[in-house]
């Protein structure tokens, strides 16, 4: 954690900072995304949608946020 | 009409879900979401394949597939395209299940980029793991009848052999082995990959396949919506011909008009 209390995390391979005490749901909204339309993996573990609000973002977390795109 | 009755009652079932359309279409390579949606509509498909990819966090306002093709109207079948190991495919599908909320998925574990041929050792391993986790994997595979049986034993809910390499449009190169798989399988068999034009789709259905999955043949046609219509008709025609039972082939001519009463 940094001096200002913000957390250093990675989202889809990119480095980001979020304020301490942010929940996963809040973090997704802050990214401009709808939690109902994405799936999230946190440190290689899928986070069930029903649990997203209960999960607190922690320093050093690595997130993959995915959705459906066109494919064959 | 007998044919009409046969068609209207002709459905197929995979993992307890019953569908009328035997054509599954992909949603990749289209010029626009609008064209994609129109092609899906014209194809009559009740299932579309989709890929699982990272959201663009730098531009979250980009249009999304779900805005154009409603997952409540057309079943989304998430795939593992681009995965070269069982682990990658399993990881992708765990996320897909969370994104979509259902267990029916398309598993493909590729062996190499040049041919996109399936790696069957990894594919069978992934199928076993996924089935244990409650997934219902429809599995892209080689046209090997023994591997097809092994997949079934591992928990595949549908066997989907390639007719030719993905995106090649070469048409079915393996009629004999596809037919052997159809004869041996207790789960639905769908040709996945290789179809280039309508007659290829009809041919797959004439072999007794339960369905056909295609993407590029429609998406890369000059008029994708028209080709989607053609594919719908071809799958239905091939299915009807299979149900009707084709005539035996002869080496020489056999007149269609009576010889008796000839002046």
Image (cartoon, rainbow, N blue to C red):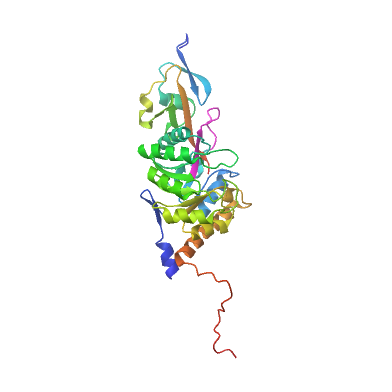
**Is B27 colored magenta in this rendering?**
no
Name the chief secondary structure element in magenta.
loop
Instruction: Pinpoint residue B151: horizontal percent, then vertical percent.
Output: 42, 45
Quarter holding residue A19: top left
What is the total number of numbered labels drawn onto the structure image?
0
Quarter holding residue A44: top left
Instruction: Pinpoint residue A17: horizontal percent, then vertical percent.
Output: 49, 18
Residue B191 visible, this orientation: yes
Q: Nearer the viewer, residue B209 or B41?
A: B209
Q: Residue at x 35, y 24 (%)?
A: A54
Q: Nearer the viewer, residue B192 or B145?
A: B145
Magenta stretch: give its range.
B49-63
Question: In the rendered view, would you say B143 is above or below A60?
Answer: below
Q: Which image quarter holds the N terminus of chain B?
A: bottom left
**Is B61 colored magenta in this rendering?**
yes
Residue B210 visible, this orientation: no
């Amino acid at each position: 954690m940094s001096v200002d209390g913000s957390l250093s995390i990675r989202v889809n391979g990119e480095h980001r900072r979020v304020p301490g005490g942010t929940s996963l749901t809040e973090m997704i909204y802050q990214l401009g995304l709808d939690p109902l339309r994405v799936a999230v993996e946190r440190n290689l573990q899928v986070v069930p949608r029903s649990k997203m609000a209960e999960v607190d973002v922690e320093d050093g977390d690595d997130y993959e946020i995915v959705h459906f795109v066109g494919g064959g | 009409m007998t044919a009409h009755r046969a068609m209207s009652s002709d459905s197929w079932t995979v993992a307890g879900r019953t569908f009328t359309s035997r054509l599954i279409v992909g949603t990749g390579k289209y010029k626009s979401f609008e064209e994609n949606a129109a092609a899906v509509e014209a194809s009559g498909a009740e299932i579309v394949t989709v890929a699982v990819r990272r959201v663009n966090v730098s531009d979250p306002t980009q249009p999304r597939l779900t805005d154009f093709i409603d997952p409540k109207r057309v079943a989304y079948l998430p795939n593992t395209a681009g995965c070269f190991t069982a682990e990658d495919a399993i990881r992708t599908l765990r996320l897909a299940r969370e994104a979509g909320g259902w267990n029916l998925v398309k598993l493909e574990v590729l062996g190499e980029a040049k041919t996109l041929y399936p790696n069957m050792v990894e594919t069978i391993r992934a199928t076993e793991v996924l089935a244990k986790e409650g997934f219902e994997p429809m599995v892209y595979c080689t046209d090997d009848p023994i591997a097809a049986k092994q997949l079934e034993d591992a928990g595949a809910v549908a066997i989907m052999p390639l007719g030719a390499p993905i995106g090649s449009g070469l048409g079915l190169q393996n009629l004999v082995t596809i037919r052997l798989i159809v004869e041996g399988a207790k789960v639905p068999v769908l040709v996945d990959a290789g179809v280039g034009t309508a007659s290829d789709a009809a041919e797959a259905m004439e072999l007794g396949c339960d369905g056909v999955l295609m993407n590029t043949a429609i998406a890369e046609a000059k008029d994708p919506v028209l080709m989607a219509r053609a594919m719908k008709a071809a799958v239905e025609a091939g299915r009807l011909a299979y149900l009707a039972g084709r005539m035996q082939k002869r080496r020489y001519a056999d007149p269609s008009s009576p010889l008796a009463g000839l002046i």
